[in-house]
Image (cartoon, rainbow, N blue to C red):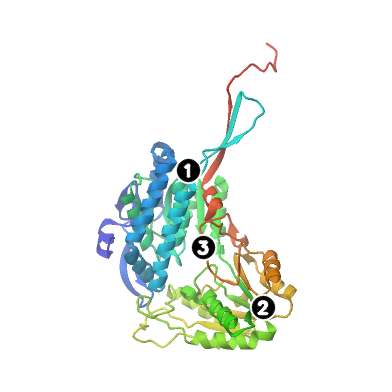
């Protein structure tokens, strides 16, 4: 795996099988969010670099072997990539921790999940039938529906789960036979750069995998509008996603958008009937809200708890939130790392300040922690924060904070709980906690969210489609639907005994 010196020497833009610097020569320092100190230097690409990468992907698709490579060979390459990821698990996990600020253990788990995604899509395409035969009602007609790659895919990924989110796009794109240009977040690009090396090592032909490191307003915008791009897949914020869709619209490109969420975690009193079940529900509420410092699109940032258990539940939640150990993610025993940037921390602080002005009651956190040996003074740390007595009119309840902030709302009836949970413009994920199996299925069926967990929070399965309702986006990732996003469907109708039709005179 390349270190910082090698990255600077060779460049981090990869097009047509070669690494290089930006055309302009511009570079960007990558900061460790635990201390705000630079630890890597990457190329800062722009529209010119993007055009070169798209041209390479276009040639590789139109003239290269990859789209016509047998499915079994494509699947075998994806499995080799999974093996290489696990071989480099420790290095990649450490790089993900330093780049994004998450704990080392979270980084390791991410790499395992990335390898799972590559294996899943390898198995999915390898086990498919070659086409769906349609009965045309005649032995002289052979009719079949087949799937073909879309073409050149522009893959734009977020900063919170850099390699995991990239794998959810790259693995199915390659499995389907496409070529691609990936643009990782400009602040967390390093593991995606490393993945391109692994793809090359696994034997992927030159030009199939291309990467441009650089900002969204230049590289991302050019990818979305580029006439030689056939599909745009974007994961990120609502404002940026809307711009991507607008840029792609004139070319009528396929577009997949995952735009975040404001996810409810609904806790009924009967889920807390015993000490053990109470402890489990509290523990899962902490995990839902504070994993990766809340910088998760599916974070359970809205706790909606039944009024009869609210006081006890919130008191215990706040007590445990105060004990979460903050620090550099690579330190043993650290449970929560820093926010990804100074800008992100300032955004979180502004949301908390507005909530307090609007009447929220602070139960824990709400400030920067004191510096320590584990928490360098320059790091972007913020304490896990619990805000009680919240209501729908508050900005902190309506808008995606993307930080370690949990709001608490209460309900008295099942209908009220469902109404609160669905009272959001987003619809990505949600959860319901109850000991009543009938209620669990009933409430889950009424929640307007793409994923609903019952008595759990956060697990995902590669086999299950991931996506949302409402303004959480369009399209699906993972599962068969995730593969379908990277395909076109073709109907091939063959007449084995053609005859004249004689519709016209002559």
Q: Earlier in the sequence, mark 1 or mark 2?
A: 1
Instruction: Indicate the position of residue 405 as horizontal and vertical percent values.
Output: 54, 79
| x, y percent for residue 410 | 68, 81
Report how far apart the C-alphas of labels 1 and 3 lie in the structure: 23 Å
Per the image, the residue denoted by label 3 is 236
Quick one: 240 or 204, which is closer to the camera? 204
Q: Residues within 10 Å of mark 2 (few under 14, many from 20)?
A: many
- The residue under label 2 is 268
Q: Residue at x 38, y 79 (%)?
A: 379
Is residue 228 shown left or right of residue 40? right
Residue 151: mark in rendering: 1
Q: Residues within 10 Å of mark 1 (few under 14, many from 20)?
A: many
User: What SS does tag 1 mark?
Assistant: loop
Tag in front: 1 or 2: 2
The residue shown at (35%, 64%) is 89
Give the CA distance from mark 1 to mark 2: 48 Å
Viewer-closest of 474 and 1: 1
Q: Secondary structure at mark 3?
A: loop
Whether residue 417 appears in this view of the structure is yes
147 to the left or right of 18: right
Q: Earlier in the sequence, mark 1 or mark 3?
A: 1
Where is the N terminus found, in terms of image quarters?
Answer: bottom left
Going from the N terminus, do you reach mark 3 or mark 2 first? 3
Q: Residues within 10 Å of mark 3 (few under 14, many from 20)?
A: many
């Amino acid at each position: 795996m390349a270190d910082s010196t090698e990255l600077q020497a060779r460049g981090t833009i990869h097009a047509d099988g070669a690494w290089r610097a930006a055309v302009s020569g511009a570079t960007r320092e990558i900061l460790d969010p635990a201390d705000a100190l630079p630890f890597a230097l990457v190329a800062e690409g722009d529209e010119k670099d993007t055009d070169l990468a798209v041209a390479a992907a276009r040639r590789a698709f139109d003239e290269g072997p990859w789209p016509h490579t047998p499915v079994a060979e494509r699947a075998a390459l994806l499995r080799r990539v999974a093996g290489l990821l696990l071989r480099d698990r420790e290095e990649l996990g450490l790089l993900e921790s330093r780049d994004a600020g998450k704990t080392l253990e979270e980084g390791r788990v991410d790499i395992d999940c990335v390898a799972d995604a590559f294996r899943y899509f390898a198995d999915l395409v390898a086990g498919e039938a070659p086409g769906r035969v349609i009965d045309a009602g005649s032995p002289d007609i052979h009719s079949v529906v087949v799937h073909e790659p879309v073409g050149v895919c522009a893959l734009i990924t977020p900063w919170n789960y850099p390699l995991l989110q990239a794998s959810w796009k790259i693995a199915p794109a390659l499995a389907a036979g496409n070529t691609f240009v990936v643009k990782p977040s400009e602040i967390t690009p390093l593991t995606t750069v490393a993945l391109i090396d692994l793809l090359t090592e696994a034997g992927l032909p030159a030009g199939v995998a291309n990467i441009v490191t650089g900002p969204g307003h230049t590289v991302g915008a050019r990818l979305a509008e580029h006439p030689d791009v056939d599909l745009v897949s974007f994961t990120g914020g609502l404002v940026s996603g809307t711009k991507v869709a607008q840029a792609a619209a004139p070319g009528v490109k396929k577009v997949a958008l995952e735009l975040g969420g404001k996810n409810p975690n609904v806790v009924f009193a009967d889920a807390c009937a015993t000490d053990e079940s109470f402890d489990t529900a509290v523990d899962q509420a902490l995990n839902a809200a504070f994993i990766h410092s809340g910088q998760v699109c599916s974070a359970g940032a809205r706790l909606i708890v039944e009024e009869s258990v609210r006081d006890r539940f919130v008191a215990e939640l706040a007590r445990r939130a105060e004990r979460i150990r903050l620090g550099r993610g690579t330190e043993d025993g650290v449970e929560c790392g820093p926010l990804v940037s100074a800008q992100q921390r300032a955004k979180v602080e502004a949301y908390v300040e507005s909530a307090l002005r609007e009447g929220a009651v602070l139960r824990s956190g709400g400030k920067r922690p004191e510096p320590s040996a584990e928490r360098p003074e320059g790091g972007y740390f913020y304490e896990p924060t619990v805000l009680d007595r919240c209501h729908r009119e508050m900005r902190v309840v309506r808008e995606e904070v993307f930080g370690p902030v949990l709001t608490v709302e209460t309900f008295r009836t099942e209908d009220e709980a469902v109404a609160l949970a669905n009272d959001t413009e987003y619809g990505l994920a949600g959860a319901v906690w109850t000991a009543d199996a009938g209620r669990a299925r009933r409430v889950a069926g009424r929640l307007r969210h793409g994923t609903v967990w019952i008595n759990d929070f956060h697990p995902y399965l590669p086999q299950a489609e991931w996506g949302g309702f409402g303004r959480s986006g369009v399209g699906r990732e993972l599962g068969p639907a995730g593969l379908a996003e990277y395909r076109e469907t073709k109907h091939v109708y063959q007449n084995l005994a053609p005859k004249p039709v004689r519709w016209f005179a002559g």
